[in-house]
């Protein structure tokens, strides 16, 4: 089985726990996710199955949008509601203060990763040091806040809407915003509402997935090429497609492009395994789809050369086409 499931991860589950649950429901063999969400966060978590796992890194690096609520005036040991209170200060924040801080934190900034994170130091996750009461030195990292909007929810709470680059910690952003407002803060809610072009409105919950039949679950899968929707598209003829899948560069009049999604006919010489399709669909699809336009993999173009990147193998391409053909 190959494809992408857009999951609305619930609160309380780790990303891996949510992945394993979906993997079991879909009876998948190979699976991975595209970026960890804390157990205390909910929202968009793209899950990759089969050949789609080859392209999951593309969404690890994607920009992400978060919606968060921060409680002003109270700092905690973890930067969220799970930690103990370590400082309290009065809150005297105006609308003008929020506008000033929005501007201060929009664009390139430097951020020190929190101790309660999965980042590793000497082979050990920072949160493991934190659990032992040990604080280790962390180097500041360059991240970018593409968009930031702050709004008052209640006297002591603000709403944070932020589109950020990879590697940005929203808990740390909330803490830093609190410091800039002069009162400190910690997150009380966090939800990822978009990642790399995928939005929460496209997602399915685990509860809904559990209530579906097997075919309904499979119908929720997006094709593997959904992960490269923003890439430049190149379509090859049969001969060039076969050579490209062998790892050979192809020449053409393509302009230079760093990210290319390559399509072409499915390799017709690959035998279709009967066990891939059940029932009557086997006879009608085992040979009928070899001329279909299929996703072959990624590449980049330099000086008119199409240079292969990550490729699907012929069996994966056939399996994908057969899955799409099965009602």
Image: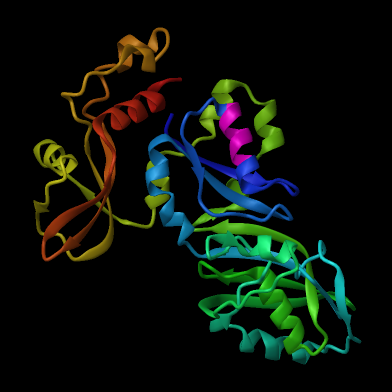
Q: Main secondary structure of the magenta part?
A: helix
Q: Position of residue 301 (x, y in %)?
A: 19, 60
- Which residue is located at x 71 percent, y 45 percent? 13
Is 21 covered by the magenta stretch?
yes
Q: Is residue 189 left or right of residue 143?
A: right
**Residue 87 rendering spot, x and y as whole percentages:** 87, 80
Task: Say if 18 sits above or below 76 in the image.
Answer: above
Relative vertical location of residue 311 with respect to residue 42 in this rendering, above or below: above
For residue 141: magenta? no
Answer left or right for 42 relative to 285.
right
Q: Coloring scheme of the render? A: rainbow
Q: Residue at x 80, y 82 (%)?
A: 184
Residue 255: give x, y in percent of width and height: 17, 64
Residue pictured at 42% horizontal, 54% vertical: 57
Residue at x 47%, y 29% (from the top left corner)? 29
Q: How many marks?
A: 0
Among the 4 quarters of the image, the one containing residue 74: bottom right
Q: Position of residue 277 (x, y in %)?
A: 39, 15
Up the image or down, 89 lies above or below 195; here it is below
Q: Which quadrant of the structure image shows residue 294?
A: top left
Where, quadrant-wise, is the N terminus in this rendering? top left
Please provide the residue range marked out in magenta.
18-25
Quarter where residue 102 is shown: bottom right
């Amino acid at each position: 089985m190959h494809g992408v499931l857009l999951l609305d991860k619930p609160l309380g589950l780790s990303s891996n726990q949510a992945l394993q649950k979906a993997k079991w429901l879909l009876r998948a063999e190979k699976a991975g996710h595209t970026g960890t969400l804390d157990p205390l966060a909910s929202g968009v978590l793209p899950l990759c199955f089969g050949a789609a796992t080859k392209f999951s890194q593309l969404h690890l690096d994607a920009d992400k949008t978060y919606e968060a609520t921060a409680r002003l005036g109270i700092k905690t040991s973890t930067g969220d509601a799970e930690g103990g209170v370590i400082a309290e200060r009065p809150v005297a924040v105006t609308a003008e203060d929020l506008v000033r801080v929005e501007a201060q934190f929009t664009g390139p900034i430097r951020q020190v990763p929190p101790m309660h994170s999965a980042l590793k130091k000497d082979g050990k996750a920072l949160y493991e040091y934190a659990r032992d009461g040990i604080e280790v030195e962390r180097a500041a990292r360059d991240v970018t806040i593409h968009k930031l909007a702050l709004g008052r929810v209640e006297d002591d709470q603000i709403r944070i809407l932020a589109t950020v680059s990879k590697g940005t910690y929203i808990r740390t952003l909330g803490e830093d915003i609190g410091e800039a407002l002069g009162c400190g803060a910690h997150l009380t809610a966090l939800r990822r509402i978009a990642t790399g072009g995928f939005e929460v409105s496209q997602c399915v919950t685990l509860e809904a997935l559990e209530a579906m039949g097997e075919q309904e679950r499979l119908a929720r899968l997006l094709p593997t090429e959904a992960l490269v929707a923003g890439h430049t598209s190149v379509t090859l003829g049969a001969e060039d497609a076969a050579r490209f899948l062998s790892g050979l560069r192809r020449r053409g009049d393509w302009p230079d492009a760093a990210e290319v999604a390559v399509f072409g006919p499915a390799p017709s010489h690959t035998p279709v395994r009967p066990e891939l399709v059940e029932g009557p669909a086997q006879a009608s699809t085992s040979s009928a789809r070899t001329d279909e336009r299929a996703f072959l993999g990624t590449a980049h173009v330099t000086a008119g050369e199409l240079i292969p990147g990550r490729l699907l193998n012929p069996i994966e391409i056939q399996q994908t086409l057969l899955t799409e053909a099965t009602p």
